[in-house]
Amino acid sequence: TTLLLFQNAALLEVLNVALGFVRSNLGLTFVQVMSRVVVVCGVLWATPTAPLSYGLPLLLIAWSITEVIRYSFYALNLIGTVPYFLIWCRYTFFYALYPIGVSGELLCLFAAQSFISQSKQWTIEFPNCLNFTFSYHYFLLGIMATYPFLFPKLYLYMIDQRKKIIVNPK
């Protein structure tokens, strides 16, 4: 439940960017936060198979280290005293943590597939009063299919941020 609470609270990051409190790319922030919310709420919390995956410890390690660094950075930035070591950690650790976290997410999504496919969880089939069909199984497969396209974009964005902050600071 702690993971559920904190990852859903991260939706506030999207709101902060949208309202201009934090300078960041709204689209990339939305994608990053929503991928975690889907994995936590729609996969780990919703299926018995995903929490047993090797992906869970991977994403927990990557997310935990990332969040401790990120929120420490935000808190110290509010009072105007961020030590260089924390800045360096924030813009360097992602080199390893991002691929580890994404691998964990994908392993959990994959581990949920058999259960969701067999149970038809959150699937709407014909006939129904709305004359509408929705396959949660295919929805998650679609999300998995976006990772090879979105991960490089997010990763390269962080590399660019690192160049701006650490390599070529103003």
Image (spheres, rainbow, N blue to C red):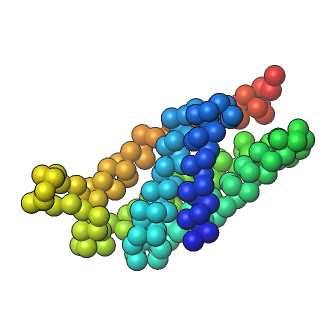
Name the residue located 43 percent from the left edge and 47 percent from the top edge. Answer: 147
Query: For the view shown, which residue lies furthest in the front direction?
Result: 129
Q: In which quarter of the image is residue 148?
A: top left
**Is the residue 164 above or below the residue 52 in the image?**
above
Total labels: the figure holds: 0
Residue sitting nearer the eye, 154 or 22: 22
* Quarter in which the C terminus is drawn: top right
Q: From the viewer's perspective, is residue 61 above or below residue 13?
A: below
Residue 29, position as x, y percentages in the image: 56, 40
Would residue 67 be found to the left or right of residue 100 on screen?
A: right
Of residues 160 and 14, the one nearer the viewer is: 14
**Side of 130 where 43 appears, left or right:** right
139 or 101: nearer the viewer: 139
| Residue located at (59% from left, 40% from top) | 15
Q: Which residue lies furthest to the left in this view?
A: 127
> Residue 117: where, in percent of width, then height?
25, 67
- Report the residue at 49% width, 63% height from top: 40
Quadrant in the picture for residue 109: bottom left
Tell me where residue 34 appears, x and y as whole percent.
49, 49
Q: Residue at x 58, y 58 (%)?
A: 7
Percent of width and height locating residue 119: 25, 73
Camera sees residue 100: no
What is the residue that sits farthest to the top in this orientation?
A: 170
Classify the position of the N terminus by image quarter.
bottom right
Q: Is 73 situated left or right of 46 in this image? A: right
Q: Can residue 169 be seen in this view?
A: yes
